[in-house]
Image (tube, rainbow, N blue to C red):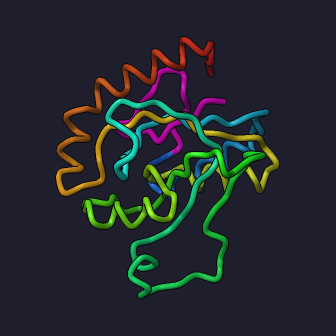
Amino acid sequence: MLICAGDIEQIKGAVPIGVGLINSAINLTRLCLMNPPEFLLFVGTAGSYGKKGIFDIFETKTASNIEQGFLSKSAYTPLDNIISTAEDVSRETIVNCSNYITASKKVSEQYLKLNLQAESMEFYSVLAVAKEFNIPAGGLFVITNYCYEDAHEQFIKNHKEAINLLENKIQDLGLKK
């Protein structure tokens, strides 16, 4: 099953599950309870912390939920904050997920030091729900912006072309709903 965030992130052939960690988890859980899929593929856009370029497309099966408070050592969590369905995590692009969008080159550089390369609001929730239901899952992303001070402006400027590139990639791979 192809899934996407929804709202302005509508992708042909993908079922929208909601924006952010909470909405995506609730709606995806509902979908899995009603009609469990054999596989989940989240498709969407992501911001780059600096290594991946605008319009780069990548696949991954690994996400983290590391908040900026962790970077400044002003917060901690007793929970696992990395989840993966990959057999070899060392080769994975780790997508960090939060309900907040990073808009600082300095903070992005700190995430890179943790081997986190991109940012998506929903992917951690997707992998957490998939793990709970024992459903294989992954993500297919296109970079729309760098997570710097002008992140939102870059996202808006590049969003339409990024979605077109992603939809073409989905078609080239022969994926469908």
Q: Nearer the viewer, residue 122 or 118?
A: 118
Q: Nearer the viewer, residue 109 or 168?
A: 109
Q: Is residue 168 left or right of residue 156?
A: right
Q: Residue 177: x and y, percent?
A: 62, 22
Tag count in the figure? 0
Decide if residue 95 is in sight here: yes
| 26 versus 11 height, above or below | below
Q: Residue 18: x and y, percent?
A: 48, 47
Quadrant into which the N terminus falls:
top right
Residue drawn at 58 percent across, 49 percent down: 27
Residue drawn at 47 percent across, 42 percent down: 5
Residue 27: within the magenta? Answer: no
Residue drawn at 51 percent across, 58 percent down: 115
Residue drawn at 41 percent across, 31 percent down: 56
Q: Residue 41: x and y, percent?
A: 63, 34
| 133 versus 155 height, above or below | below
Q: Is residue 108 left or right of residue 133?
A: left
Q: Is residue 93 left or right of residue 84?
A: left
Q: Is residue 104 left or right of residue 37?
A: left
The secondary structure that most of the magenta stretch takes on is loop
Residue 14: within the magenta? Answer: yes
**Farthest-out residue, bottom:** 74
| 110 versus 85 height, above or below | below
Q: Nearer the viewer, residue 13 or 62?
A: 62
Q: Residue 165: x and y, percent?
A: 39, 21
**Farthest-out residue, right:** 134
Decide if residue 129 is in sight here: no
Q: Which residues are magenta?
A: 1-17
